[in-house]
Amino acid sequence: ATNIKNPDYFHKVVDCQWACPAHTPVPEYIRKIAAGRFDEAYMINWKSNVFPGILGRTCDRPCEPACRRGRVEASNLERPEPVAICRLKRVAADMKSDVKSMMPKRSSHRNGKRIACIGAGPSSLTVARDLAPLGYEVTVFDRDHRPGGMIWSQIPRFRLPMEVIDEEVGYILDLGVRFEQRHVESMKAMLEERFDAIFVGTGAPKGRDLDLPGRSEASANIHVGIQWLASVSFGHREQIGSRVIVLGGGNTAMDCCRTARRLGGEDVKVIVRSGFEEMKASPWEKEDAMHEGIPILNYLVPTAFVHENGKLTGMRFDRVVAQFDDKGRRKLVSAGEPEQFFPCDDVLIAVGQENAFPWIESDAGIDFDEWGMPRLDPKSFQSSLPKVFFGGDAAFGPKNIIWAVAHGHDAAISIHKHLEGSDLLDRPLAGMSLMSQKMGIHEWSYDNEILPEKRHKVMWADVEVTLKNVSMEVELGFDPASAWKEAQRCLNCDVQTVFEAKLCIECDACVDICPMDCISFVPDGDEADLRTRLKAPATNTSQDLYISKGLKTNRVMAKDEDVCLHCGLCAERCPTGAWDMQKSLIQMVHATELECSKRHAGAALVEA
């Protein structure tokens, strides 16, 4: 039988939360939005992902491809789409009131331990947020004059307004976290300052270049993408040539091309060596660029920068085709056609980022691998020098903001455990509560109606206006009515079908009424065998089956969680109450909760 008391079981059923690196309880905050309780929705987000307003505009959205709505509607809509989870997060941020009174208070005591966070990006700020309330004296260092790291230096203002960054970074500084503008140039010097622990969250600050013919001669008009975006954020660059080529297929390339359009680029194009579908950029990032009239040209490999007397005039490209071997591995080979020439005034290179640690001396006690990455314990983020931890892009290479936040939470636990002298690998388990949603006969405390609504679109400002202003936000977010409608599309996957075998009379009424044919009563067997004998075969092996204890007829109830709509019809139909709809709330443990639980346990022992 399935052990539903294991927090991971129902956690995996809530696909969006399981896919989120920070494990944000998505259905819970969406219900709050639907009820107009925006402050509560914001704080649910803030506890887990730290930057709801920022992420509501910029997150890579791993939750949305996992969303059940996009899976179970396949037969109903031509293009089934997930709930707009990310943009609903923004709704909570945009429509909340002043939530400062709901934030943790600055610690009234100090524990005498000092923490240095090098780099003021999302990972370092998360570490600081989790440790400051415990009495640690946390100082965040960054060479830039304001905290935020790549959040403010590399993400354009037309996607993320500065006031949103300042507000959410401000909540962290209000906890007593100290920010110091300093370009850290020596790890050994930092170690001499006698910090009890050091967290390195410096990101992946080095943009990859292209060593092609003509690169050095035409360097004045060839720019590395992330450095160029930073120079725009700093106000150092306010214009670019009218003809611009952007090289690369990731999100940085999309930011570069859209920024170039706002700085005077009239003929801006993105040129990529891969196919359109293989591009690393998020689908919505590509759509946004094309919406602004920027073409994306695929399967073109750059071969040379063309110049006249040091003045860039264009680039040459070789057209390639994709070939696949018998294992499905792709190789790009020349199509054998004449090279293509594209004229341009400027080129932006956005072909990737790398880590760079020139300030960490080779004899500082921190080991690096052959790729120049720190050797870390993958669970604790601890380096070979026990008091030094890494996180975010600095730990395992470029990812995204939500992963940096998740790393920060984990690293904060490790730092706390290290300074407490406890086992860093003894990680706290998530908690889970189950609460019946029954309010009466055939009545639930949540809205279980499932409507075949298409995904609602976020409003945009007029393109002709926004292209003239590099700081004007393009997306306007949902209005209250659209937010409510989009929130109704959530299937409440955290409201679970809980089965009590001893109450079942095996009438099979639940089998008959289930719209997805996901409930079966069959002779027992191992899970692999059961999957083939259900009313509808359960093909997604990454999602466990829900298998009951043995019933009176020696059968078991076996349910395919992967396609369940959480509609509650089985519980409404059951004559004996063997089925119940229970909300599962997963509580992830951060450093602050870890300390609180320890104090509560200590108090209980004293009382005993």
Image (tube, helix red, strand yellow):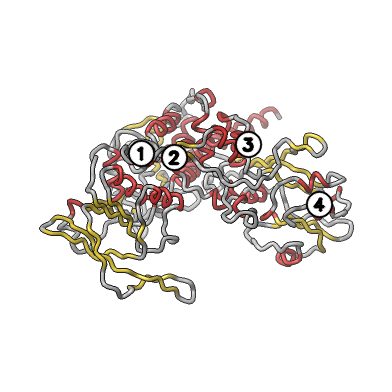
Residue at numbered disc 3 = 31
Q: Which one is closest to the eye, mark 1 or mark 4? A: 1
The kind of residue tagged 1 is Thr
Q: Nearer the viewer, residue 34 or 226?
A: 34
How many residues crowd around disc 3 within 10 Å: few (fewer than 14), some, or many (20 or more)? many
Residue 197 in view, yes or no: no
Establish if 338 lies above or below 58. Answer: below
Q: Which one is closest to the eye, mark 2 or mark 4? A: 2
How many residues crowd around disc 2 within 10 Å: few (fewer than 14), some, or many (20 or more)? few
The kind of residue tagged 2 is Trp
| Secondary element at image label 3 | helix
Q: Distance between the residues labelled 2 and 4?
A: 45 Å
Residue at numbered disc 1 = 466
Residue at numbered disc 4 = 510
Residue 472 place in picture, x, y as percent: 36, 36
Q: Distance between the residues labelled 3 and 1?
A: 33 Å
Q: Distance between the residues labelled 2 and 3?
A: 25 Å
Q: How far apart are marks 4 and 3 (CA)?
A: 26 Å
